[in-house]
Image: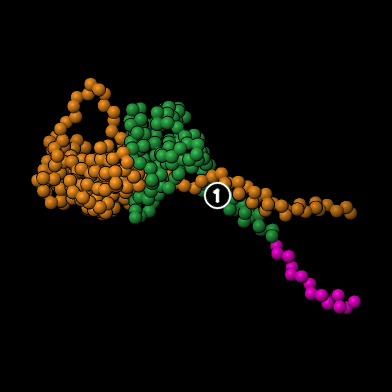
Amino acid sequence: MSKFSKKKKGLPPINTASLPDIVFMLLFFFMVATTMRETTVMVAQTLPNATEIKKLQDKRLIAYIYVGEAQDVETYGEGDKIQLNDKISAVKEVKSFIFAAREGVNEDERDYMTTMIKADINCTVGTINDIKKELRDIDALKVTYSARKGEIE
Amino acid sequence: MARRDTPEINAGSMADIAFLLLIFFLVTTTMDVDAGISRRLPEKQPPEAPDPPIIKEKNVFEVIINMKDELLIEGEYAKVKDVRQLAIDFIDNGGGIGNPISDFGETEGQECSWCQGAKNPDSSVHPNKAIISLKTDRSTTYGTFIKVQNELGGAYTDLRNRLSQEEYGQLYTDIVTELEKDKGNEVLKGKISRIRTMYPEIISEGEN
């Protein structure tokens, strides 16, 4: 019997009492540092690099327009597509989209609204110009071309 | 005596719950900062508006990008990396008398005293009269368009930085970052608007 009692004792269990604390810390970090995703992007999005970029502060005052080739080419076809909110739309719908965005903002802040054009690096300027023309028609003159901070190659 | 100690709560699953929440937040949130190149579109003119004033050709810096993403600057082939220096030379030329700047109490146009350009009579007369015209083809790639826009914006930033260094001993970009941290600082705002008036960004975008 002594053969059995000689058996080595296993390693003491690792104390995991502080594990929840660590995970909560990570959780709070992500809750503070990130923002909720509001739309699912349905078009290709490789943003261009630029050095002269300006950060936009207030997300409430930004209307996003996504441009790029649709990820689901079979449904939407090839070529540049414009995504407003959660669906692929035609250029002429940009106006009503901006009007809707204006509705959600206080009247005194509407002058500060910006339209952010998030366009894929491979799309053509013609599509962007069409959007710009629509925006000019309804006096949404502040435009930001989305870009990442980085050296241009 | 009866035992008063409450039994210990099993906290073993706490970590699991926290992980679950953590993963939820990882999936549903984004971290990207909204940044980009800001431009202001020209206002739409009513149909009965008077004809726009005629702009002298020497005050226009023409950049054309064709459908093959090739660059033509003032009628000559160029590379993207040349754009910045060419634009700086053009804006900073200061070969004559500019528009009067009402903020400085000017009633008549003055020469550009802060320009260090070549004062070439065939190039722009004053930074506030120098117009950069960027023309693109419909089939130009957006990536190239942004690269050129970036270089043109960079030319203004370089000039503003130089002017700011001379006037206030501080880079223009540093003043802007400082203002972001200290919002509503009137001194910084004044400096920025002064430099912006001296080198106003006039970029016109058009289609060929």
Task: Residue at 76%, 70% (x, y): give it.
Answer: A10
Find numbered disc 1 in the image and state the secondary structure of the residue it sits on: helix
Which is more toward the observer, A72 or B207? A72
Q: Is residue A102 visible?
A: no
Q: Does residue B114 show up magenta in the picture? A: no
Residue at the left extreme, as displayed: B121
Task: Residue at 68%, 52% (x, y): give it.
Answer: B16
Q: Is residue A36 left or right of residue B145?
A: right
Q: Residues within 10 Å of mark 1 (few under 14, many from 20)?
A: some
How many discs appear? 1
Snapshot quadrant of residue B44: top left
Range shown magenta:
A1-15
Q: Quadrant of the C terminus of chain A?
A: bottom left
Q: Is residue B164 left or right of residue A103?
A: left
Residue B191, position in %: x, y?
27, 45
Task: Residue at 16%, 31% (x, y): give it.
Answer: B53
Q: Is residue B197 left or right of residue A118?
A: left
> Is the residue B122 above or below the residue A153 in the image?
above
- Amino acid carrying label 1: it is Phe
User: What main secondary structure does the magenta stretch of the protein show?
Assistant: loop
In the rendering, what colour is chain A? green
In the rendering, what colour is chain B? orange
Snapshot quadrant of residue A103: top left
> Is the residue A7 above or below the residue A102 in the image?
below
Snapshot quadrant of residue A136: top left
